[in-house]
Image: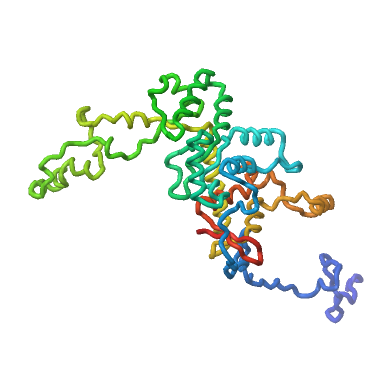
């Protein structure tokens, strides 16, 4: 027997073995059995920023419709309304808005380039009587105090934005500032407008072709869109092929089977056929005189800004719930985008590092609408009949989609 043999190799004596990988627990709860966290179902889905489901479960109380927005404004007459509409269109540039110098210059230049005009719908929203207002507009236009500018094809019915008013003094200022137009042509245009105070169209015979080109490039003249006029449509002489007997004998699928070309033209079609000059009726002198129309420079950006602002305001109302009505104060907050206030309490919160709203430069109001005022857009929607205001008694004024 070897002397190295000891009792440790005997099966009667065991030695407790410890794992070298086992580490001491840092917490008395580490040895407890682990369990998966309980997944609780969400009672309501996460709502969006403007989700008001449950906020207005009932209709707002209606104590009467507000017919005018100028009840608290000392406005007398159409001239003051047009001047006021031009003065309060945009918000002043905020001191702490988050804008850099190029953006500030871009906003101010865009505002300066817009024409000094006001839509007819805006004037009606700030007036007390539509009948009296229309009568006053006609009298002022006849006296060369203001001028009505019409852009065809912009809106339907009361929601049109193509009718606007401009004071004649502002029109003279715009003509004088046009650098591409010489002094003689400026005076010739103004004299023609004074002699035709109520005319919307301008006769091409009153100006030379070169002068018309200059005025078009400057934005004071535009060509009319060809409208459907039965007196100027080209006509094909009617033939006896439109009789029922001739139609019944014609081959199926042919032009004669539908009454011939005269039937299509009489229904308003043109067939896309090439015709000789003898088949066209020459337009009358009155039609030739209506080829041009008075316009204002940069009317396109102005109307684009107006239509996009109205569409955005209507979308904010539609997001308020199924009744499509919302208090005016809440609609104003959404239009402003939750910007930080300029009152002492908001400034104190900002100094303490607390949330006091977003910077104006990050809101849609300033990024897309150049700081357009909420009251101005609301007046456009009210005047065009898209929305109406009413008294609620509890939350102030309410606005609903008509």
Q: Residue furthest bottom?
A: 12
Looking at the rendering, which quadrant does residue 89 occupy?
top right
Q: Position of residue 21 (x, y in %)?
A: 82, 65
Q: Position of residue 165 (x, y in %)?
A: 52, 39
Q: Is residue 34 visible?
A: yes
Up the image or down, 226 lies above or below 13; here it is above
Looking at the rendering, which quadrant does residue 395 occupy?
bottom right
Pick the residue in front: 332 or 31.
Answer: 332
Pick the residue in front: 235 or 316.
Answer: 235
Q: Quadrant of the N terminus?
A: bottom right
Q: Position of residue 278 (x, y in %)?
A: 20, 28
How many numbered circles does the render carry?
0
Pick the residue in front: 14 or 44.
Answer: 44
> In the rendered view, does 117 fall on the left or right side of 95?
left
Q: Is residue 368 visible?
A: no
x 38%, y 23%: residue: 205
Up the image or down, 243 lies above or below 302; here it is below
Q: Residue furthest right?
A: 3
Pick the residue in front: 215 or 50.
Answer: 215
Q: How is the image coloured?
A: rainbow
> In the rendered view, does 280 fall on the left or right side of 196?
left
Q: Position of residue 318 (x, y in %)?
A: 54, 58
x 59%, y 68%: residue: 61
């Amino acid at each position: 027997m070897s002397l190295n043999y000891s009792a440790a190799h005997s099966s009667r004596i065991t030695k407790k073995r410890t794992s070298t990988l086992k580490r001491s627990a840092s917490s008395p709860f580490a040895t407890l059995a682990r369990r998966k966290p309980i997944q609780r179902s969400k009672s309501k889905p996460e709502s969006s920023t403007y989700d008001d489901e449950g906020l207005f479960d009932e209709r707002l109380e209606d104590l009467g419709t507000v017919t005018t927005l100028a009840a608290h404004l000392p406005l007398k007459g159409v001239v003051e309304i047009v001047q006021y509409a031009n003065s309060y269109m945009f918000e002043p540039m905020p001191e702490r808005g988050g804008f850099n110098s190029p953006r500030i210059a871009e906003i101010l230049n865009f505002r300066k380039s817009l024409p000094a005009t006001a839509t007819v719908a805006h004037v009606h929203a700030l007036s007390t009587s539509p009948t009296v207002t229309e009568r006053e507009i006609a009298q002022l236009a006849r006296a060369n105090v203001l001028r009505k500018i019409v852009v065809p094809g912009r809106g339907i019915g009361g929601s049109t934005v193509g009718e606007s008013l401009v004071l004649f003094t502002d029109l003279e200022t715009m003509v004088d500032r046009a650098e591409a137009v010489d002094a003689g042509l400026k005076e010739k245009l103004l004299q023609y407008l004074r002699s035709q105070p109520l005319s919307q169209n301008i006769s091409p015979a009153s100006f030379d072709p070169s002068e018309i080109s200059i005025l078009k490039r400057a934005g004071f003249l535009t060509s009319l869109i060809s409208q459907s006029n039965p007196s100027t449509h080209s006509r094909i002489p009617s033939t006896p092929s439109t009789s029922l007997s001739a139609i019944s004998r014609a081959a199926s699928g042919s032009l004669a089977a539908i009454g011939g070309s005269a039937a299509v033209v009489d229904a308003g079609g043109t067939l896309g056929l090439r015709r000789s000059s003898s088949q066209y009726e020459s337009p009358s002198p009155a039609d030739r005189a209506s080829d041009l129309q008075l316009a204002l420079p940069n009317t396109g950006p102005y109307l684009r800004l107006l239509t996009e602002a109205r569409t955005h305001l209507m979308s904010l109302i539609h997001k308020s719930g199924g009744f499509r009505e919302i208090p005016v104060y809440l609609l104003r907050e959404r239009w402003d985008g939750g910007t930080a206030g300029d009152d002492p309490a908001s400034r104190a919160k900002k100094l303490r590092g607390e949330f006091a709203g977003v910077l104006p430069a990050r809101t849609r109001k300033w990024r897309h609408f150049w700081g357009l005022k909420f009251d101005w857009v609301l007046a456009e929607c009210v005047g065009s009949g898209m929305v109406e205001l009413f008294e609620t008694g509890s939350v102030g004024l309410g606005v609903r989609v008509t």
